[in-house]
Image (cartoon, grey):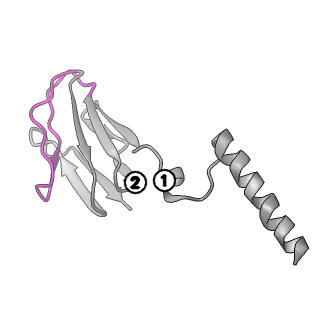
Amino acid sequence: MIGRRVSVAGLAVVVAIGLLLGWPCGTAKAQQEAPARVEVKIDNFRFGPGTLTVLVGTTVTWTNRDDMPHTVVSADGVFRSGVLDTDETFSFTFRNTGTFPYFCSLHPKMTGKVVVH
């Protein structure tokens, strides 16, 4: 019984020191991370990468690096950018799982896909 109390007391000391030093202690708050941000470049009439796999909560930003204007439009109407001129961006945060195909409405052969887990 005494040995057990020492172990619990020793554990309490280690946890206290860990909290003071900022060690994660398994709480949900400690394990939360900042939302991810991912970029897709529009260049040479292509989305790169063409297929992107991300986690729920990720913000994807498309940047037009082409000399021509482009758009980013989801096939199912979930998101839609305006016309993006060179160096302009459009961002969307994915809050649900699923597969989200998209295209450029000005150049419909330009397609991409975001897979959200």
Q: Position of residue 27 (x, y in %)?
A: 55, 58
Q: Position of residue 78 (x, y in %)?
A: 15, 54
Q: Residue at x 73, y 46 (%)?
A: 17
Label 2: which residue? 53
Q: Position of residue 96 (x, y in %)?
A: 27, 61
In the orientation shown, which residue stands out farthest toward the front?
Answer: 2
Nearest to N terminus: mark 2 or mark 1: 1
Quadrant of the rendered image containing residue 6: bottom right
Q: Residue at x 9, y 35 (%)?
A: 82
Pick the residue in front: 107 or 89.
89
Vertical side of 108 occupied by 56: above or below: below
In the orientation shown, which residue stands out farthest toward the bottom?
Answer: 1
Pick the residue in front: 63 or 55.
55
Does the magenta run of residues contain 82?
Answer: yes
Pick the residue in front: 29 or 111.
29
**Highlighted range, magenta:** 64-86
Side (left or right) of 52 relative to 64: right
- Mark 1: amino acid: Lys
Name the mark on residue 29. 1
Q: Position of residue 77 (x, y in %)?
A: 10, 55
Quadrant of the rendered image containing residue 83: top left
Q: Residue at x 20, y 24 (%)?
A: 88
